[in-house]
Amino acid sequence: MTIVEDRPAEAEAPPPRRSNLVWALLRNSWRQLTSMRTALVLLFLLAVAAVPGSVYPQRSVNRERVTQYFTNHPKSAPILDRLGAFDVYASPWFAAIYLLLFTSLIGCVLPRLRDHIRAMRTVPPEAPKRMDRLPHHAPATASEEEPAVAAERLARTLRQRRFRTRLRELPDGGFSIAAEKGYLRETGNLFFHFAMLTVLIGVGFGHWYGWHGNRILVTGDDQAFCDSITQYDDSSLGPRVDAADLPDFCITLADFKATYQSTGQAKSFLATAKVTEDGGAEQTRTFTVNDPLRLKHANVHLLGQGYALELRYTDKYGVSQDKIVPFLPTDAMLTSEGVAQFPDVNIDPDTGKRDDTQQMGFEGVYLPTASTDGSASSTYPAEDDPVLYLSAYRGNLGLDVGIPGSVYALDRDQISSGDLKKISGDRPQALHKGESWTLDDGSKLEFVGTRKYATLSIRYDPTQTSVLAGAVTGLIGLMLSLFVHRRRVWFRVLPADDRQAGGSVIEAGGLPRTDYPGFADEFATLSKQAPGSKQVPGRDPEEGTP
């Protein structure tokens, strides 16, 4: 007969609360975000995300190149623009990676810093009972020294070798010495990660409170440049910077010298400038490519050089206008292209009115050293045989339509629409310095001469020093983490078996905490510090130990 025992039904576990599930999801997400693997992945993504900033022109650096890219690629440029390809470092997706990396580093570094401080304050652990199981082991050897004397001498030797050493007395009259070295490895790791945080913070604040601008500055006292937002060819102010915050200084490019090798390759550049700051006295300063002009609140970098042409146009009424026009280089030999526009000419002296259909524009190529084969390219960057080739246009230049255009090219829309007509024929007019060109209406263009100009980049970055300090600290931390190795060494000093005869027995063990091929030699050197080389046979390593 089978007896069936009635048992109460087990109560079903209540379903987890939704708040607990959300909390668990947040906790796991935070752990994943602050892991070292995630930080490395985000660092790699940040490097990949910065690649488009080098491939595509950036508005913050050169708006003219962005405009030219739109002209050359009318179909793909708007799509790339919507993706932020021309403002990579200000795009939302780049900022998201940047902030996630910043958060990941903070969440990763702070717990490691706490653990490292705790490890630095913790004494080295006691020697294991079976030191013969360690990767490195020196068998027990007999010594004539008393245990206390031998232990003190071994501890002193380890301290001299910069080991953190702890000497303990055992209950049986012996001594245990525990030593550890290589804490700088983790210190270097922390230095490296904190340096990355410093660089990230510095770059972020530098973007907020920094500014930069580019300017082509022609030599001559009549071409002085003062720091104003309207004086720059292109500029970019940080979100926390206003035009009124720009420092007060003026620069005049007094002279610019360039030397070249026989092949035409540039050898040296030297710019001489007259500088005034905050209304002070004028100073003459020199700077070059790798030695910028350092002002109180800005640095002036030399980016390039070229030629500015002095042109004089005399209209049909005999009124002359002079212009100094920079021509932009197109190759290393300084073959340069540019335009000269004269909108305020051919004004009727009787009525004083300007006829927009009589505006003049000249487009051409300047060759510092003309080619002997007649090609439109220079053979040497210095002015050995300068020639200017020009084409003349008459009509409406399109400067009053309200649409910003390039000052280095005529408006092609005006030319294609017929509002600006070419009047010089198919072959451009060749001019040497001092020569003039008389046009069909009796007006005249004279090639007066040339001046040198320098392309300057004027920048201010308030966090430049901190970013440099972070980079140097990161390199130091990286070297410490690569070349410092953490390892532990133990010595156990026990009384000899024959206590009446005195002496001691010394055993050693070592454990490298990281992959360190040189630890075997270091351990062998430390083991020799134990006096006496006579091995004690058959001694139980656990005998006499706690």
Image (cartoon, rainbow, N blue to C red):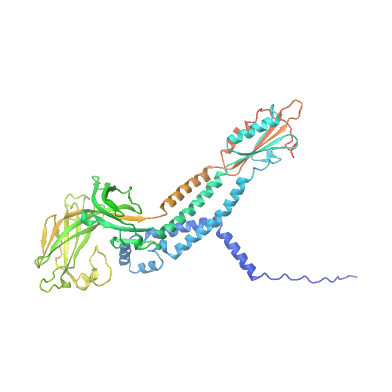
Percent x, y of residue 301? 32, 52
In the image, 306 versus 470, the foreground residue is: 470
Query: Which quadrant of the rendered structure holds the C terminus?
Result: top right
Across and down, in percent, residue 537 comes to: 72, 31
Q: In the image as oriented, which residue stretches furthest toward the top? A: 501
Taking the spot 62% from the left edge, 31% from the top edge, the residue there is 529
The vertical placement of 251 against 3, above or below, is: above
- In the image, residue 293 sits, relative to residue 158, either above or below, namely below
- Is 7 displayed left or right of 138 in the figure? right
Query: Which residue is the extreme one toward the front?
Result: 280
- Please tell me in which quadrant of the rendered image residue 343 appears: bottom left
- Residue depicted at 31% across the width and 57% down the height: 248
Residue 57 shows in this picture? no
Residue 62 visible in rendering: yes
Apparent side of residue 527 relative to residue 451 in the rendered image (left or right): right
* Above or below, 122 relative to 77: above
Q: Left or right: 71 with respect to 323? A: right
Residue drawn where x is 59% and y is 64% of the image: 26
What residue is shown at x 33% (from left), y 51% (from top)?
Answer: 295
Q: Is 474 in front, or is 12?
A: 474
Q: Position of residue 62 (x, y in %)?
A: 33, 61
Q: Position of residue 484 (x, y in %)?
A: 54, 42
